[in-house]
Image: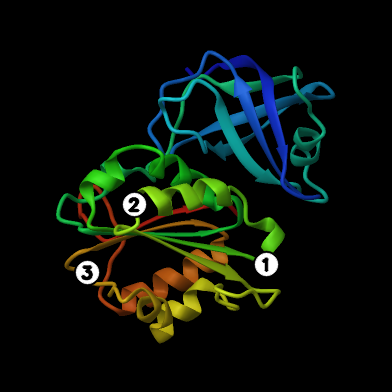
Protein backbone atom coordinates (compact mmCIF):
# COMPACT_ATOMS: atom_id res chain seq x y z
CA UNK A 1 0.00 0.00 0.00
CA UNK A 2 1.34 3.42 -0.94
CA UNK A 3 2.03 5.65 2.02
CA UNK A 4 3.01 9.28 2.47
CA UNK A 5 6.49 10.22 3.65
CA UNK A 6 7.64 13.60 4.87
CA UNK A 7 10.21 15.66 3.04
CA UNK A 8 11.67 19.14 3.26
CA UNK A 9 12.40 21.71 0.59
CA UNK A 10 16.16 21.80 0.05
CA UNK A 11 16.18 24.19 -2.92
CA UNK A 12 13.68 26.36 -4.75
CA UNK A 13 14.10 27.78 -8.25
CA UNK A 14 11.77 30.49 -9.54
CA UNK A 15 12.09 30.49 -13.33
CA UNK A 16 9.49 33.25 -13.76
CA UNK A 17 6.18 34.31 -12.23
CA UNK A 18 4.46 31.00 -13.06
CA UNK A 19 7.18 28.32 -13.33
CA UNK A 20 9.06 26.83 -10.40
CA UNK A 21 11.25 23.90 -9.39
CA UNK A 22 11.46 22.35 -5.95
CA UNK A 23 14.23 20.01 -4.81
CA UNK A 24 13.06 17.79 -1.96
CA UNK A 25 15.14 16.10 0.72
CA UNK A 26 13.41 12.88 1.76
CA UNK A 27 13.89 9.15 2.11
CA UNK A 28 13.54 8.93 -1.61
CA UNK A 29 11.66 6.05 -3.22
CA UNK A 30 13.47 4.01 -5.82
CA UNK A 31 12.44 5.16 -9.28
CA UNK A 32 13.32 4.86 -12.93
CA UNK A 33 14.04 7.98 -14.99
CA UNK A 34 10.76 9.13 -16.51
CA UNK A 35 8.53 8.13 -13.60
CA UNK A 36 6.48 10.32 -11.26
CA UNK A 37 5.52 10.50 -7.60
CA UNK A 38 2.54 12.11 -5.92
CA UNK A 39 3.34 15.36 -4.11
CA UNK A 40 1.01 16.60 -1.41
CA UNK A 41 0.26 19.35 1.09
CA UNK A 42 -2.22 19.48 3.95
CA UNK A 43 -4.91 21.99 2.99
CA UNK A 44 -7.57 22.40 5.63
CA UNK A 45 -8.53 18.90 6.79
CA UNK A 46 -7.43 17.25 3.57
CA UNK A 47 -4.12 16.13 2.12
CA UNK A 48 -4.21 17.23 -1.50
CA UNK A 49 -1.86 15.34 -3.80
CA UNK A 50 -1.04 15.44 -7.50
CA UNK A 51 1.40 13.45 -9.69
CA UNK A 52 4.64 15.22 -10.63
CA UNK A 53 7.38 13.78 -12.82
CA UNK A 54 10.89 13.78 -11.39
CA UNK A 55 13.50 15.90 -13.16
CA UNK A 56 16.53 14.55 -11.33
CA UNK A 57 18.21 11.28 -12.35
CA UNK A 58 17.83 8.29 -10.00
CA UNK A 59 21.43 8.54 -8.80
CA UNK A 60 20.92 11.98 -7.22
CA UNK A 61 19.71 12.18 -3.59
CA UNK A 62 17.34 15.14 -3.96
CA UNK A 63 14.02 14.68 -5.75
CA UNK A 64 13.21 17.58 -8.05
CA UNK A 65 9.91 18.59 -9.64
CA UNK A 66 9.22 21.24 -12.29
CA UNK A 67 5.75 22.79 -12.35
CA UNK A 68 3.71 25.81 -13.30
CA UNK A 69 1.03 27.47 -11.24
CA UNK A 70 -2.61 27.23 -12.27
CA UNK A 71 -4.84 30.18 -11.28
CA UNK A 72 -7.59 28.06 -9.72
CA UNK A 73 -5.41 25.08 -8.86
CA UNK A 74 -5.71 23.87 -5.26
CA UNK A 75 -2.08 22.74 -4.99
CA UNK A 76 0.27 24.47 -7.45
CA UNK A 77 0.05 27.95 -5.96
CA UNK A 78 0.69 26.60 -2.48
CA UNK A 79 3.70 24.68 -3.76
CA UNK A 80 5.02 27.88 -5.31
CA UNK A 81 4.72 29.63 -1.94
CA UNK A 82 6.95 27.08 -0.18
CA UNK A 83 10.52 27.95 0.70
CA UNK A 84 13.68 26.22 1.84
CA UNK A 85 13.08 24.19 4.99
CA UNK A 86 9.32 23.89 4.58
CA UNK A 87 7.63 20.51 4.92
CA UNK A 88 6.13 18.68 1.96
CA UNK A 89 4.63 15.21 1.51
CA UNK A 90 5.38 12.64 -1.17
CA UNK A 91 4.44 9.04 -1.81
CA UNK A 92 6.93 6.28 -1.07
CA UNK A 93 6.54 4.71 -4.53
CA UNK A 94 7.08 5.99 -8.06
CA UNK A 95 4.91 5.07 -11.02
CA UNK A 96 4.70 5.50 -14.78
CA UNK A 97 5.67 3.67 -17.95
CA UNK A 98 7.29 6.58 -19.78
CA UNK A 99 10.71 4.98 -19.32
CA UNK A 100 13.50 3.84 -21.59
CA UNK A 101 13.03 0.25 -20.41
CA UNK A 102 9.76 0.30 -22.37
CA UNK A 103 11.48 1.27 -25.64
CA UNK A 104 12.01 -1.72 -27.97
CA UNK A 105 15.63 -2.77 -28.45
CA UNK A 106 15.49 -2.29 -32.22
CA UNK A 107 14.91 1.46 -31.90
CA UNK A 108 17.94 3.45 -33.03
CA UNK A 109 16.75 7.08 -32.81
CA UNK A 110 14.98 8.53 -29.78
CA UNK A 111 12.62 11.47 -30.30
CA UNK A 112 11.54 13.29 -27.12
CA UNK A 113 8.68 15.73 -27.76
CA UNK A 114 7.56 17.89 -24.81
CA UNK A 115 5.48 20.93 -24.02
CA UNK A 116 5.77 23.04 -20.89
CA UNK A 117 6.83 21.23 -17.74
CA UNK A 118 6.38 17.94 -19.59
CA UNK A 119 10.08 18.21 -20.40
CA UNK A 120 10.82 17.05 -16.83
CA UNK A 121 10.90 13.26 -17.31
CA UNK A 122 13.03 13.62 -20.43
CA UNK A 123 15.61 15.66 -18.53
CA UNK A 124 15.76 12.88 -15.97
CA UNK A 125 16.41 10.30 -18.71
CA UNK A 126 19.07 12.43 -20.38
CA UNK A 127 21.02 12.66 -17.12
CA UNK A 128 21.53 8.89 -17.17
CA UNK A 129 23.95 6.93 -19.34
CA UNK A 130 21.31 4.83 -21.10
CA UNK A 131 20.14 7.13 -23.92
CA UNK A 132 23.72 7.96 -24.92
CA UNK A 133 24.74 4.30 -24.94
CA UNK A 134 21.63 2.91 -26.66
CA UNK A 135 20.71 5.35 -29.43
CA UNK A 136 22.41 6.72 -32.52
CA UNK A 137 20.52 10.05 -32.30
CA UNK A 138 18.58 11.74 -29.50
CA UNK A 139 16.21 14.61 -30.34
CA UNK A 140 14.62 16.89 -27.75
CA UNK A 141 11.84 19.15 -29.07
CA UNK A 142 10.59 21.46 -26.32
CA UNK A 143 7.56 23.69 -26.87
CA UNK A 144 6.38 26.68 -24.81
CA UNK A 145 4.33 29.82 -25.37
CA UNK A 146 7.04 32.29 -24.33
CA UNK A 147 10.83 32.07 -24.12
CA UNK A 148 10.80 32.75 -20.38
CA UNK A 149 9.04 29.41 -19.89
CA UNK A 150 11.98 27.42 -21.25
CA UNK A 151 13.46 25.91 -18.11
CA UNK A 152 16.76 24.08 -17.55
CA UNK A 153 18.47 25.54 -20.61
CA UNK A 154 21.87 25.31 -18.89
CA UNK A 155 21.34 21.58 -18.45
CA UNK A 156 20.21 21.19 -22.06
CA UNK A 157 23.27 23.09 -23.25
CA UNK A 158 25.39 20.65 -21.25
CA UNK A 159 23.89 17.74 -23.18
CA UNK A 160 24.81 19.53 -26.41
CA UNK A 161 28.41 20.04 -25.28
CA UNK A 162 28.85 16.49 -24.02
CA UNK A 163 27.14 14.74 -26.96
CA UNK A 164 27.56 17.06 -29.97
CA UNK A 165 27.28 14.30 -32.57
CA UNK A 166 24.29 12.59 -31.00
CA UNK A 167 22.06 15.20 -29.35
CA UNK A 168 19.77 17.66 -31.15
CA UNK A 169 17.75 20.30 -29.29
CA UNK A 170 14.94 22.15 -31.04
CA UNK A 171 12.92 24.82 -29.17
CA UNK A 172 9.38 25.81 -30.12
CA UNK A 173 8.00 29.19 -28.98
CA UNK A 174 4.45 29.82 -30.17
CA UNK A 175 3.73 33.34 -28.86
CA UNK A 176 7.02 35.00 -29.80
CA UNK A 177 9.40 35.07 -32.73
CA UNK A 178 12.74 33.79 -31.43
CA UNK A 179 15.87 33.18 -33.47
CA UNK A 180 16.58 29.47 -33.74
CA UNK A 181 13.14 28.41 -32.53
CA UNK A 182 10.11 27.26 -34.48
CA UNK A 183 7.25 29.75 -34.13
CA UNK A 184 4.54 27.07 -34.25
CA UNK A 185 3.31 23.94 -32.49
CA UNK A 186 5.30 20.71 -32.61
CA UNK A 187 2.63 18.75 -34.56
CA UNK A 188 2.75 21.26 -37.42
CA UNK A 189 6.40 20.41 -38.08
CA UNK A 190 5.63 16.69 -37.97
CA UNK A 191 2.93 17.18 -40.59
CA UNK A 192 4.99 19.27 -43.00
CA UNK A 193 8.36 17.63 -42.35
CA UNK A 194 10.03 20.84 -41.16
CA UNK A 195 11.45 19.31 -37.99
CA UNK A 196 13.07 16.44 -39.86
CA UNK A 197 14.36 18.80 -42.53
CA UNK A 198 16.05 20.99 -39.94
CA UNK A 199 17.70 17.98 -38.29
CA UNK A 200 18.54 16.10 -41.46
CA UNK A 201 16.98 13.05 -39.78
CA UNK A 202 13.89 11.08 -40.75
CA UNK A 203 11.21 9.71 -38.47
CA UNK A 204 10.90 6.10 -39.54
CA UNK A 205 9.02 3.21 -37.98
CA UNK A 206 11.97 0.95 -38.72
CA UNK A 207 14.36 2.86 -36.43
CA UNK A 208 12.55 5.59 -34.46
CA UNK A 209 10.83 5.69 -31.09
CA UNK A 210 8.88 8.80 -30.14
CA UNK A 211 8.10 9.74 -26.54
CA UNK A 212 5.62 12.56 -25.90
CA UNK A 213 4.85 14.33 -22.65
CA UNK A 214 2.89 17.48 -21.89
CA UNK A 215 -0.34 19.04 -23.07
CA UNK A 216 -2.97 16.54 -24.24
CA UNK A 217 -3.74 18.59 -27.36
CA UNK A 218 -0.17 18.41 -28.57
CA UNK A 219 0.02 14.69 -27.85
CA UNK A 220 -3.28 13.84 -29.56
CA UNK A 221 -2.40 15.84 -32.67
CA UNK A 222 1.13 14.49 -32.86
CA UNK A 223 0.05 10.87 -32.38
CA UNK A 224 -2.53 11.20 -35.15
CA UNK A 225 0.13 12.49 -37.55
CA UNK A 226 2.65 9.84 -36.53
CA UNK A 227 0.09 7.06 -36.94
CA UNK A 228 -0.75 8.32 -40.42
CA UNK A 229 2.93 7.81 -41.23
CA UNK A 230 2.97 4.19 -40.11
CA UNK A 231 4.10 4.51 -36.50
CA UNK A 232 1.90 2.89 -33.83
CA UNK A 233 1.40 3.22 -30.10
CA UNK A 234 3.68 1.11 -27.96
CA UNK A 235 2.15 -1.59 -25.77
CA UNK A 236 3.94 -4.31 -23.88
CA UNK A 237 1.98 -7.00 -25.67
CA UNK A 238 2.40 -5.23 -29.01
CA UNK A 239 5.66 -3.24 -29.20
CA UNK A 240 5.37 -0.02 -31.13
CA UNK A 241 6.97 3.35 -31.78
CA UNK A 242 5.01 5.90 -29.68
CA UNK A 243 4.95 6.31 -25.88
CA UNK A 244 2.94 9.07 -24.17
CA UNK A 245 2.29 10.76 -20.83
CA UNK A 246 -0.45 13.41 -20.68
CA UNK A 247 -0.29 16.20 -18.09
CA UNK A 248 -3.72 17.76 -18.73
Classify 10 Å Cα crowding around label 2: few (below 14), some (14-19), many (20 and above). some
Q: Label 1, secondary structure: give it.
A: loop
Q: Residue at x 63, y 56 (%)?
A: 150
When asked about the image quadrant of residue 239, the answer is: bottom left
Distance from the alpha carbon under mark 3 to that under mark 1: 30 Å
Classify 10 Å Cα crowding around label 1: few (below 14), some (14-19), many (20 and above). some
Name of the residue lying farthest toward the bottom: 192
239 relative position to 219: left or right: left
Q: How is the image coloured?
A: rainbow
Query: In front here: 181 or 246?
Result: 181
Q: Residue at x 28, y 47 (%)?
A: 132
Tell me, yes or no, whether the two marked residues, 2 and 1, touch with CB atoms within 8 Å: no
- Residue matched to label 2: 163
Distance from the alpha carbon under mark 3 to that under mark 2: 24 Å
Q: Residue at x 78, y 26 (%)?
A: 83
The percent position of residue 45, horizontal first and vertical second, equals: 81, 21
Inspect this view and state whether residue 34 appears. no
Query: Residue 145 got which mark?
Result: 1
The percent position of residue 39, horizontal first and vertical second, equals: 63, 29
The percent position of residue 72, horizontal first and vertical second, equals: 82, 49
Q: Is residue 64 above or below residue 246?
A: above
Q: Label 2, secondary structure: give it.
A: loop
The percent position of residue 133, horizontal first and vertical second, equals: 23, 44
When asked about the image quadrant of residue 101, the answer is: top left
- Residue matched to label 3: 205
Query: In front here: 103 or 217?
Result: 103
Q: Earlier in the sequence, mark 3 or mark 1?
A: 1
Q: Earlier in the sequence, mark 3 or mark 2?
A: 2
Amino acid sequence: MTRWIEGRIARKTRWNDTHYSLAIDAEAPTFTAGQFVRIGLDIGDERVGRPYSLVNPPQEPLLEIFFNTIPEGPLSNRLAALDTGDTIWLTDAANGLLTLSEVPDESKDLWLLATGTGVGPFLSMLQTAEPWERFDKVVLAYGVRQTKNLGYLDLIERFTREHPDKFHFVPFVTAESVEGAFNCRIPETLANGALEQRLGLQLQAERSHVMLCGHSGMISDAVEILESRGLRRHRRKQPGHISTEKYH
